[in-house]
Image (cartoon, helix red, strand yellow):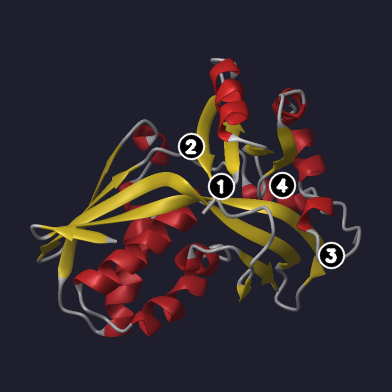
Amino acid sequence: MRAEAGRWSELAPAKLNLALHVRGRLPDGRHALETLFAFCIDGDRLSGEPADEISLAVTGPFADALGSREDNLVLRAARALKERAGASQGAALTLHKALPIASGIGGGSADAAAALRLLTGMWKLDPAHASAVAPKLGSDVPACLLGMTCHGSGAGDELELADEVGVAGAPALLVNPRVPLSTGEVFARWDGVDRGPLDDDWRGGRNDLELPARGLVPQIGDVLDWLVARNGITLARMSGSGATCFALFEGEQARDEAADACPAEWWHLATALR
């Protein structure tokens, strides 16, 4: 986080599920997951200034895709934090939406987490308030609030920091076929088969949501086939519930060459993992 001349700014980094195993159902009806979260050095950006009330403006290439501002997770996060902490302040927030929505890379969850971090600093709050609010906003929000490589279990909201070989600094290319995909619809199509736990080596893992996601958006298969054919690739996989896929590369040059060759009709982001 940085603050300059009364204006605060916080990155909402893109989230990747390097592996995502669906193990069954929890007693509350949510899906039981085992996943390895990682975060990119790029993403959306939230800025804000002190104000009497809480407000939100949205800019950026995917601003129009968000729909109603009142339903935005940034506002929900800000209001929930204010209520939890008993804060009297407001904030004029601006979200620069650089990541596609409904795309499996954190999106709204990362934005909500950025709001919790930014307002904790701006309002001088105990960080415990943000930690308490995060799980109520979504299963991915606690991981996005942490913003560090971690293992997720439960519904993905039970976290343990991870120091995995081959993650930090890895050159990555994110590619999305520009087709929004509902997380609920993807989970609803999961076949219910437990294909086993996530072992110590995440590179040998899988994404159990890839098959149902490809049934809804066949273009995911095209993206993955294209990524696998790039030079210097070490891993290609779908993130979260899709439709964004990612590839990790041996070096930045191989990543940049792949980014330059990416079909124009697809969204892509050349980045690296934190």
Q: Which residue is mark 1?
A: 105
Q: Residue at x 46, y 48 (%)?
A: 41
* Mark 2 residue type: Pro
Q: Three-letter amino acid code at disc 1?
A: Ile
CB-based contact (under 8 Å), mark 4 and mark 3: no
Mark 2 sits on what residue? Answer: 100
* Residue 229 place in picture, x, y as percent: 76, 23
N-terminal label among 2 and 1: 2
Percent of width and height locating residue 98:
39, 38
38 or 250: which is nearer to us?
250
Question: Nearer the N terminus, badge 3 or badge 2?
Answer: 2
User: Label 3 neighbourhood size at 10 Å, few (<14), some (14-19), many (20+)?
Assistant: few
Q: Label 4's element?
A: helix
Sequence-first tag of 4 and 2 = 2
Where on the picture, by quarter, is residue 199? bottom right
Cα separation between marks 1 and 4: 15 Å
Q: Are marks 1 and 4 in contact (CB under 8 Å)?
A: no
Q: Nearer the viewer, residue 23 or 226?
A: 226
- Mark drawn on residue 186: 4
Residue at which label 3 appears: 199
Circle 1 — which element?
Answer: loop
